Image (cartoon, rainbow, N blue to C red):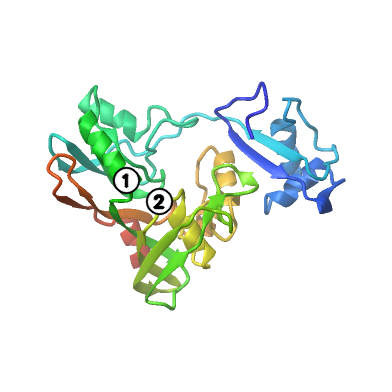
Amino acid sequence: MDYPPGTDRRGILLTFPVPPECAGQRLDRFIQGRIPRLSRTRAKVIVEACAYRADGRRRRGSERVKAGEIVILVRPLFEEPEVPRRFDVLYEDEFVLAVDKPAGLPMHPTATYHRNTLTALLRERYGDPAPQIAHRIDRETSGLIVCGRTPFAERRLKRAFEDRRVAKRYLAVVQGELLESQGRIDAPLGPAREGLHLLMEVRADGAPSETRFEVLGRRAGRTLLSLVPHTGRQHQLRVHLASIGHPIVGDKLYGPEGSLPFLEYIDAGMVLDEALLARLGHPRQALHAAALEIEHPDSGAPLRLEASMPEDMIALWASGR
């Protein structure tokens, strides 16, 4: 679904299909039921400020929803938040640049971020033409990113990722203690049918998706995992781990409360208060891109790269909380 006419396309688009059993509910009560832990008062405020029809007309909380219709919310844009504006260089030659991206730094400009992105920082440090990022990881995920320093190298690197000729390994701290020492998650993934448009879910008609895991340690109701994705679907590791009952600690989208922590975080201007932090267990999803092997775009020789687990994840694991 596209943004309704007249709305800000930089805003956050959410859609909620109305099932038959909800027909006739007030719109604010329907939204309250679709966003867990949302108060009636807060639901009414959100509807009055953000609810639209497909033709761009505004909606009121007292309206009655109809079976089969799609309720549309467009959450407004806010001021660009501060993020870590740094990165460490792990490897560099005339063709390749590998960096260790800190958690919280976005990869590319979005509706929210413009100046505070890895793309902008690469341009600031290297000028134009800047090294071009060959793949991506989520904003809150830390770790290895590979860039091409020439158009030729960029094309070769991107093609290697597209053709799955890259071996990747991640580290994650998850909720609960996995019984198996190693295993495989084979669950197809596709876009979520309702809610935030960036969400993915396990669904029978989704794209084939496979993740292998190995337990590195168990401590106080948590597990440290080594993860190897054999496919590269959006949010694959996060959705797969949540699907087996072991979501990544600190995940605002796929934890036990679903996307509610993310929406609360957005409403607070991307400020994490103590109450929300206590519920999440960590300020960000405890996921780190730790190792990568790819053919060098010029020589064709194997290029093996590693990024050490960051201090915040080391402290999280050591705390045993």
Alpha carbons under labels 2 and 1: distance apart = 9 Å
State which quarter of the image contains the C terminus.
bottom left
Amino acid at pointer 2:
Gly
* Disc with the residue nearer the chain's start (2 vs 1): 1
Q: Does the CB distance between marks 2 and 1 fall below 8 Å?
A: yes
Q: Is residue 213 left or right of residue 145?
A: right
Q: In this figure, which residue is indicated by the disc labeled 2?
A: 232
* Image quadrant in which the N terminus is located: top right
As rendered, which of 54 and 317 lies closer to the eye? 54
| Identity of the residue drawn at 37% across and 58% down | 230
Of 53 and 125, the residue lying toward us? 53
To which residue does mark 1 refer?
A: 161
- Circle 2 sits in a helix, a strand or a loop, which is it? loop
- Three-letter amino acid code of the residue under disc 1: Phe
Instruction: Sort mark 1 into few (<14), some (14-19) or many (20+) by Cα contacts within 10 Å.
Output: some
- Regarding residue 250, the answer to whether it shows in the image is no
Q: Position of residue 266 (x, y in %)?
A: 56, 40
